[in-house]
Amino acid sequence: MTNSDIVQKLWNLCDVLRDDGINYSDYVTELVLLLFIKMEFEQAQSNNSFTHKLPEGARWPDLAGKSGINLLDHYRQMLLDLGKNSDPLIAAIYADAQTRLKEPRHLEQLIKSLDGIDWFSASRDGLGDLYEGLLEKNASETKSGAGQYFTPRPLIDSIIHCIKPQPSETIQDPAAGTAGFLIAADTYIKSNTDDHYDLNEKDRSFQRNRAFVGIELVSGTRRLALMNTLLHGMGVTKKV
């Protein structure tokens, strides 16, 4: 399944959201809040080096194993609790997060549909690609425009190969968007250092925890950037 196939399947879920009275402007936010929980679980299942970032009780099986009003109540409380999580990154991701879903059956339908998608390519390409694909669909369907510019992946990769980021350099993106440039820079450095194994411990720690700085003013996009970098195992200095 290609990334565009997944985007189309996700966009088709907007019919479910519309049936619950949710408008176009809230489609992407609603889907992304669920997507991150699903993809975090997929990452932990498929990658032994990726440990769960979400606490017990706030993971995908905790949603998939419930139904009816119990499911909707659990999901609402989960979002509130994640916004108060002791991990500052998780708390930042879910700050002020809430669902506008009112019908438990619609949440159940979304969860079942997400469970039916092959997530291999999504895990590989990143949540940011899916998000940008959804924004593009939203712009074309509503004719209102996405409101933001997202740099195409081939252009990002070309720029990264021109500047050739190196270990121990601080890499900052003053308009980070969904963190595409930062993730591409991290991928480039990892590919040239055997996934950091060629670095000494000091440089390895720097790359994992302090090398990348992103600035993003739009709260929803910032949320996505934090989700995306977390799923890619990056430690990003969080700024607004």
Image (spheres, helix red, strand yellow):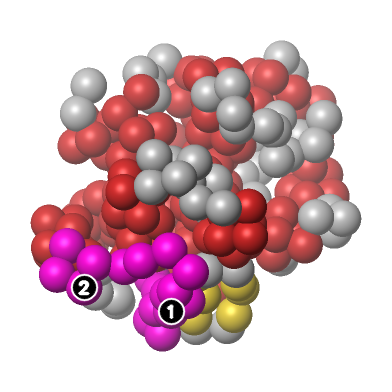
Please identify the quadrant where the C terminus is shown.
bottom right
Residue 115 image offset from top left, x and y in percent: 48, 18
Q: Is residue 154 positioned above or below 114 on the image?
A: below
Please identify the quadrant where the N terminus is shown.
top left
Q: Is residue 228 visible?
A: yes
Q: Is residue 23 visible?
A: no
**Distance (Cα) linking label 2 and label 1:** 13 Å
At horizontal 69% and vertical 64% (from top left) the residue drawn is: 92
Judge left or right: residue 165 versus residue 226. Answer: left
The residue type indicated by label 2 comes to Ile
In the drawing, what numbered circle is on residue 163?
2
Which secondary structure type mostly characterizes the magenta part of the structure?
Answer: loop
Judge left or right: residue 154 versus residue 186. Answer: left
Task: Determine which quarter of the picture holds residue 130.
Answer: top left
Residue numbers of the magenta segment = 161-177
- The residue closer to the viewer here, 169 or 2, is 169
Residue 119 image offset from top left, x and y in percent: 39, 24
Task: Determine which quarter of the picture holds residue 116.
Answer: top left
